[in-house]
Image (cartoon, helix red, strand yellow):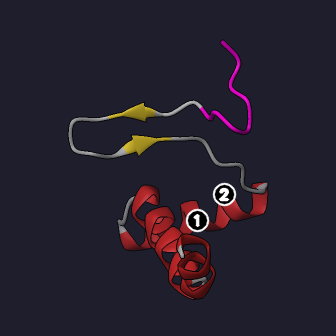
């Protein structure tokens, strides 16, 4: 089955997390890998933090769409 934009392929874990795929530029990947090597923080942690930041910055939009 090929996923559509409306139905992305997601794997669910018992911990309540899912796995998905994101596309980033080669430069972003290189810089993220360098940051992770320097700080010993996993890439997934930085990606989750980035998602949280974007969601927080757009909280008003989410509140309007939920109303």
Furthest toward the left, the residue is 14
* 48 falls in the magenta region: no
Badge 2: residue crowd in 10 Å (few <14, some 14–19, many ≥20): few
Q: Which residue is mark 1?
A: 32
Q: Is residue 3 above or below residue 55?
A: above
**Coordinates of residue 63 in the picture (x, y in percent):** 53, 80
Q: Quadrant of residue 62?
A: bottom right
Badge 1: residue crowd in 10 Å (few <14, some 14–19, many ≥20): some
- Which quadrant: the C terminus? bottom right
- Which quadrant: the N terminus? top right
* Mark 1 → mark 2, Cα distance in angstroms: 5 Å
Query: Residue drawn 53% across and 71% down?
Result: 66
Magenta-drawn stretch, dominant element (helix, strand or loop): loop
Please, what secondary structure does the residue beneath circle 1 have? Answer: helix
Q: Are marks 1 and 2 in contact (CB under 8 Å)?
A: yes
Furthest toward the front, the residue is 67
The magenta segment: 1-8
**Coordinates of residue 50 in the picture (x, y in percent):** 53, 72
Q: Which residue is mark 2?
A: 29
Q: Quadrant of residue 3?
A: top right
Query: Residue drawn 45% across and 72% down?
Result: 49
Please, what secondary structure does the residue beneath circle 2 have? Answer: helix
Query: Residue drawn 50% across and 63% down?
Result: 47
Left or right? Give the position of 27 relative to 46: right
Q: Is residue 37 above or below residue 15?
A: below
């Amino acid at each position: 089955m090929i996923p559509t934009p409306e139905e992305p392929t997601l794997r669910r874990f018992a911990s309540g997390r899912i796995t998905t795929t994101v596309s980033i530029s080669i430069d972003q990947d290189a810089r993220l890998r360098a940051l992770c090597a320097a700080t010993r923080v996993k890439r997934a942690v930085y990606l989750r933090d980035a998602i949280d930041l974007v969601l927080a910055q757009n909280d008003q939009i989410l509140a309007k769409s939920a109303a």
